[in-house]
């Protein structure tokens, strides 16, 4: 197998970004959005994101446990400060969704963009270690990005965004992957020490989003026991995918 090239790395990371948009497609079957359906969507999104967070932390610990923990704290501080600033704005609008729902979508987009940035560096660093590892990581991230795109769509579509716009915004959240994969590949020795920090950063922001926004919203529409079942099943499915890919 030939050695990886810059063009190959960019193409591979672009594929992972586009795969995120596929997650919105199942929501094309959604006809109307009831409060219960919105609660179910929040619970599923929380379970998917919780599994993604677990994977981010596990991967970060393989590089440096301490730097991953530093990233977790920085991610928490960053998303908390962003929420404080955005709470002072009354004109938040994204994908034709305004007000509190627009703010929630903006926060989830910010969290998933941080997540994508860390994954982009991961793709570049992996290709810096060889074509075989790079191809495997690319396939794994692309497959993971589909349910992560679903998590984004489950937040956006029930709040008024079209499926097409949800898919577009999901892809947009993954744009950092091709943008950061190439420099990480070219300067792997410089980027590698920051990878666990980036993974922890994304994980910390996602954890805050899950417990501060998604789960409280989910519990407003269905009883907590049902929310717990949905979150656990979603988490299990996502971790099952991780197990299959890891095997």
Image: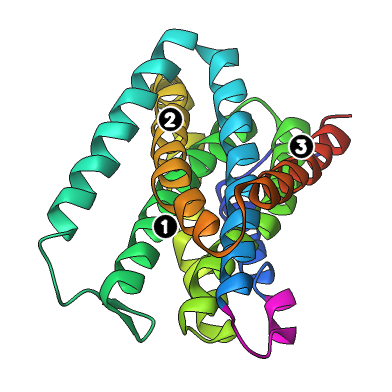
Circle 3 packing at 10 Å, graded few (<14), some (14-19), many (20+), is many
Quadrant position of the N terminus in the picture: top right
Q: Residue 108 shows which numbered tag? A: 1
Q: In the displayed structure, would residue 125 be above or below residue 177? A: above
Residue at screen point 76% across, 37% down: 239
Looking at the image, is mark 1 or mark 3 earlier in the sequence? 1
Q: Give the side of residue 111 with respect to residue 218, left or right.
A: left
Q: Position of residue 8 (x, y in %)?
A: 64, 51
Q: Are the residues at dot 1 and dot 3 in contact (C-beta closer than 8 Å)?
A: no
* Residue highlighted by disc 2: 187
For the question of whether residue 35 can be seen, the reply is yes
Measured Cα–Cα span from mark 1 to mark 2: 30 Å
Tag in front: 1 or 2: 1
For residue 50: magenta? no
Label 2 packing within 10 angstroms: few (<14), some (14-19), many (20+): some
Q: Is residue 210 left or right of residue 227?
A: left
SS assignment at label 3: helix
159 and 177: which is toward the camera: 159
Going by the image, does 4 lie left or right of 216?
right
Specify start and end residues of the magenta stretch as a single range.
25-34
Pointer 3: what residue?
Answer: 239
Image coloring type: rainbow
Q: Position of residue 28 (x, y in %)?
A: 70, 85
Please provide percent x and percent y for residue 146.
69, 59
């Amino acid at each position: 197998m030939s050695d990886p090239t810059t063009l190959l790395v960019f193409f591979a990371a672009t594929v992972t970004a586009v795969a995120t948009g596929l997650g919105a497609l199942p929501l094309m079957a959604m006809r109307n959005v009831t409060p219960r359906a919105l609660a179910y969507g929040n619970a599923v999104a929380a379970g998917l994101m919780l599994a993604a967070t677990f994977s981010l932390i596990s991967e970060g610990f393989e590089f440096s446990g301490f730097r991953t923990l530093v990233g977790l704290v920085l991610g928490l501080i960053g998303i908390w400060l962003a929420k404080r600033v955005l709470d002072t704005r009354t004109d938040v609008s994204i994908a034709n969704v305004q007000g509190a729902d627009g703010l929630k979508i903006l926060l989830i987009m910010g969290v998933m963009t941080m997540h994508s940035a860390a994954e982009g560096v991961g793709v570049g660093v992996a290709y810096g270690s060889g074509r075989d590892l790079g191809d495997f990581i690319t396939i794994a991230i692309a497959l993971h990005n589909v349910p992560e795109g679903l998590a984004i769509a489950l937040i956006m579509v029930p709040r008024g965004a079209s499926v097409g716009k949800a898919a577009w915004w999901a892809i947009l959240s993954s744009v950092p992957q091709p943008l950061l994969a190439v420099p990480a590949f070219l300067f792997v020795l410089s980027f590698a020490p920051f990878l666990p920090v980036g993974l922890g950063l994304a994980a910390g922001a996602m954890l805050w989003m899950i417990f501060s926004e998604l789960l409280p919203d989910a519990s407003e529409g269905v009883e907590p026991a049902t929310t717990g079942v949905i979150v656990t099943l979603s988490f299990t499915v996502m971790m099952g995918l991780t197990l299959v890919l890891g095997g």
